[in-house]
């Protein structure tokens, strides 16, 4: 299905009640009406869903619509897509009992979530149904690709509902014991390469991690080089000297270099090793605005480097301006 709009996605096992329970909570209680429903399941779960949910006359979705006089809900019975997890060779997965099956299910979960996000305006994923590993894999895929408006939730049923597995939704006379918890999660979409179509879950996680974790850095004073991962930069000597002072500070107690009261000597001696110039017209201590400018220029230089994660600063500031201190946001070796 390629229709845009709101999508309710559910992990479904042998208890497809999760779908009508979510529809009751979202559409009837909260007023969030999906345009279609997508199920992520096993072969057995698909059989159970087809048997109990989507028949336009006898299915639970149609029964929910009749009970609450919501013909718009009845239309959803014809807008349910069922995706069965499959191995790379296309073999459907009946269970996730092996590492190989879990890896295949993770890749399928990633494709499932990406496809729904690309073909919807808003996605609401319920992880209450299915095996725990299915829900965990879908949740990881959501952290990688979800947009700010996409949501993830878990719905719980009280003891009376659990005792009646034939119940697919609360009746008009019931005091509902359905509760939905919206689950907060980090959204790593800004650091994820979205143009890669054939990607595994493990590769997508690794790609996002590389863009979050700072690469290893090295300063070679005599060469005037700052290496970020595999990329080598040649900053102006004063900026490299400031970076070297930060790296030198990190090797000690790492209190950070102060914005106010920074000794000229801490920068000047490193500047001399880089450029050979031993005299600088800098006040002692250094002017706070000058130190702030160095930090800002160094950040702009490094953040423009492709190897550096855009979500982090190379020079990190802590504390209010009058007591601010600067530290490096990465491990940095300092050599001659």
Image (tube, grey):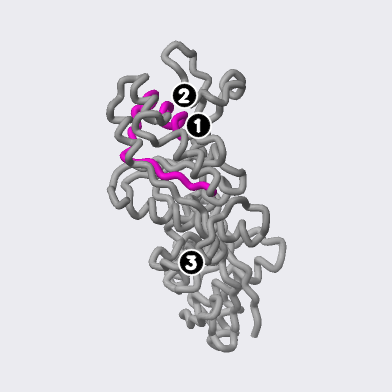
Residue 187, visible in the rendered structure: yes
Q: Does the magenta stretch include residue 33?
A: yes
Residue 109 on image: x %, y % = 50, 54
Which mark sits nearer the N-terminus, 1 or 3? 1
Residue sitting nearer the eye, 46 or 7? 46
The residue under the point 54% across, 80% down is 230
The range drawn in magenta is: 19-42
Q: Do the residues labelled 1 and 2 touch (CB within 8 Å)?
A: yes
Q: Give the Cα separation between the discs numbered 1 and 3.
A: 32 Å
In this rendering, is residue 310 above or below 180?
below
Mark 1 — residue?
Answer: 17
Mark 2 — residue?
Answer: 169
Q: Give the Cα separation between the discs numbered 2 and 3.
A: 38 Å
Mark 3 — residue?
Answer: 199
Q: Give the Cα separation between the discs numbered 1 and 2.
A: 7 Å
Q: Does the magenta stretch include residue 161?
A: no
The residue under the point 50% across, 61% down is 312
Q: Crowding near pointer 1: few (<14 within 10 Å), some, many (20+)?
A: many
Which element carries disc 1, helix, strand or loop?
helix
């Amino acid at each position: 299905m390629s229709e845009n709009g709101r999508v309710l996605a559910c992990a479904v096992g042998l208890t497809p009640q999760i779908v009508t329970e979510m529809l009751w909570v979202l559409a009837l209680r909260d007023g969030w009406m999906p345009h279609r429903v997508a199920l992520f399941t096993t072969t057995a779960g698909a059989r159970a869903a087809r048997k109990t949910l989507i028949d336009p006359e006898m299915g639970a979705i149609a029964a929910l619509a009749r009970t609450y006089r919501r013909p718009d809900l009845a239309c959803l019975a014809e807008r349910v897509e069922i995706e069965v997890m499959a191995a790379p060779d296309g073999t459907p997965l009946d269970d996730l009992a092996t590492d190989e099956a879990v890896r295949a299910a993770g890749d399928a979960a990633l494709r499932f979530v990406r496809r729904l996000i690309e073909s919807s305006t808003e996605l609401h994923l319920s992880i209450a149904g299915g095996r725990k590993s299915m829900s965990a894999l879908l949740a990881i895929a959501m952290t990688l690709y979800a947009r700010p408006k996409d949501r993830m939730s878990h719905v719980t049923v009280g003891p009376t509902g659990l005792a009646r597995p034939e119940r697919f939704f609360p009746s008009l006379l019931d005091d509902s014991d359905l509760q939905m918890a919206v689950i907060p999660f980090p959204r790593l979409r800004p650091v994820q390469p979205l143009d890669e179509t054939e990607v595994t879950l493990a590769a997508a996680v690794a790609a996002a991690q590389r863009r979050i974790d700072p690469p290893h850095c090295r300063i070679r004073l005599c060469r005037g080089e700052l290496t970020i991962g595999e990329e080598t930069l040649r900053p102006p000597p004063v900026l490299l000297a400031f970076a070297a002072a930060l790296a030198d500070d990190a090797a000690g107690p790492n209190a950070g270099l102060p914005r106010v009261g920074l000794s000229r000597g801490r920068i000047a001696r490193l500047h001399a090793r880089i450029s050979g110039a031993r005299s600088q017209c800098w006040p002692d201590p250094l002017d706070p605005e000058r130190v702030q400018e160095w930090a800002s220029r160094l950040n702009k230089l490094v953040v423009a480097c492709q190897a550096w994660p855009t979500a982090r600063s190379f020079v990190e500031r802590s504390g209010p301006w009058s007591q601010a201190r600067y530290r490096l946001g990465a491990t940095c070796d300092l050599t001659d």
